[in-house]
């Protein structure tokens, strides 16, 4: 029984990797060095047909040749040019006004599911699997080692992050939300370090959605606690009446800047770490292409060694960024529900 929860967690991660490996469209580029960086881009889930890749690939090469630039070829493939004929596995129709968020098809615009959504779903499942034993452990003191580990994390979030900022009484009301944010981001960050997976938090759209939930929490919680009118009135501190309009604009901008900073910080840190790892790995192909295969093989131990070192650091960054995003969300929400802040 003690192995059930770890095995379920491993099964969730393995299923996500296998599923995306089988149904994700594969980006391609003539340069193996640049090919590495395409792994950071979301991959649309498609109904794979073995011949589709071979059938569609020449068109991408022809398009690049017509434009006379290898960059055009890479851009076409990066956006799924190599699988133009492959139908999306899961997609929602989009109106033309929202075309920026989707892709154009023969039937209009669609918002296609990508490998990032699979790992977001996997992160939610991991929360249920790994956290399900914590209530029983806190009541009875009995639980496996994994339950005790994550109970420690949960109690740290409560006692060291939420309670010092919001106070015990208020913290209990908002703790479930902050725990969900912390572990959701943490699991997405950590899964991105597993070979064959994708890092959802390395997408600006994912971090933007997380930041939007913070903004929504700030506004809604503030309006509920202070009142719909009082919240907007209390945005501006006590200033002379002549300065009130200007200060209202400044404070209103500040309300949006705070979650925007959260979005950029999480996205940049997770993307930057992966770029460093891929850059070290890319040096092998760079030296092989420019100086010969022998130099490429000779440089591989150093490049792999540095990449492994950065991966170790990224494990710490994955935890740190979940902490920072959650801690700042706690501070922002607490400031919204207390007029004096």
Image (tube, rainbow, N blue to C red):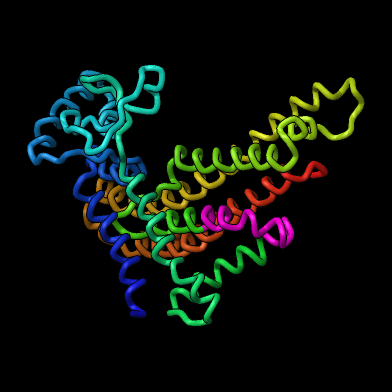
Return the x and y of residue 24 as percentages of the image width and height.
24, 43
Please say whether residue 268 is one of the residues in the magenta stretch: no
Which range of residues does the magenta coloring cover?
162-182
Q: Name the quarter where the C terminus is drawn.
A: top right
- Residue 80 is left or right of residue 247, and the answer is left
Q: Which residue is drawn at the image coordinates 25% and 21% (left, top)?
A: 68
Q: Is residue 245 above or below residue 121?
A: above
Quadrant assignment, res 300: bottom left
Quadrant assignment, res 167: bottom right
| One can see residue 231 in this view | yes
Q: Is residue 143 above or below residue 313?
A: below
Return the x and y of residue 65 as percentages of the image width and height.
20, 23
Quadrant assignment, res 82: top left
Q: Is residue 258 above or below residue 65?
A: below
Return the x and y of residue 195 as percentages of the image width and height.
31, 58
Q: Which residue is drawn at the image coordinates 22% and 38% (left, top)?
A: 89
Q: Residue furthest right?
A: 240
- Residue 33 is left or right of residue 187, and the answer is left
Please say whether residue 175 is one of the residues in the magenta stretch: yes
Dominant SS in magenta: helix
- Residue 127 is left or right of residue 23, and the answer is right
- Residue 326 is left or right of residue 251, and the answer is left
């Amino acid at each position: 029984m003690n192995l059930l929860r770890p095995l379920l967690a491993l099964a969730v991660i393995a299923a996500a990797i296998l599923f995306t490996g089988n149904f994700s469209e594969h980006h391609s580029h003539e340069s193996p060095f640049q090919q590495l960086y395409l792994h950071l881009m979301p991959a649309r889930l498609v109904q794979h047909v073995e011949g589709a890749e071979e059938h569609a690939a020449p068109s991408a090469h022809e398009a690049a040749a017509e434009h006379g630039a290898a960059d055009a070829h890479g851009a076409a493939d990066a956006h799924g040019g190599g699988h133009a004929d492959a139908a999306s596995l899961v997609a929602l129709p989009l109106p033309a006004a929202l075309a920026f968020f989707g892709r154009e098809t023969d039937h209009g615009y669609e918002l296609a599911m990508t490998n990032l959504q699979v790992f977001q779903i996997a992160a939610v499942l991991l929360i249920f699997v790994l956290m399900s034993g914590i209530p029983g452990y806190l009541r009875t003191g009995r639980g496996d080692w994994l339950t005790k580990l994550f109970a420690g994390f949960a109690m740290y979030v409560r006692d060291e992050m939420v309670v010092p900022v919001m106070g015990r009484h208020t913290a209990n009301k908002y703790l479930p939300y902050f725990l969900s944010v912390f572990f959701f981001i943490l699991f997405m960050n950590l899964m991105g370090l597993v070979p064959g997976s994708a890092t959802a938090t390395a997408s600006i759209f994912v971090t933007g959605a997380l930041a939007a939930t913070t903004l929504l929490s700030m506004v809604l919680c503030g309006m509920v606690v202070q009142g719909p009118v009082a919240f907007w009135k209390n945005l501006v501190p006590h200033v002379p009446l002549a300065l009130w309009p200007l200060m209202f604009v400044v404070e209103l901008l500040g309300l949006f800047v705070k979650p925007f900073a959260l979005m950029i910080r999480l996205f940049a840190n997770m993307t930057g770490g992966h770029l460093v790892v891929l850059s070290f790995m890319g040096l092998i192909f760079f030296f092989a292409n420019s100086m010969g295969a022998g130099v490429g093989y000779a440089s591989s131990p150093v490049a792999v060694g540095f990449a492994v070192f950065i991966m170790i650091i990224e494990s710490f960054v994955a935890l740190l960024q979940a902490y920072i995003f959650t801690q700042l969300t706690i501070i922002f929400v607490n400031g919204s529900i207390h007029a004096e802040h």
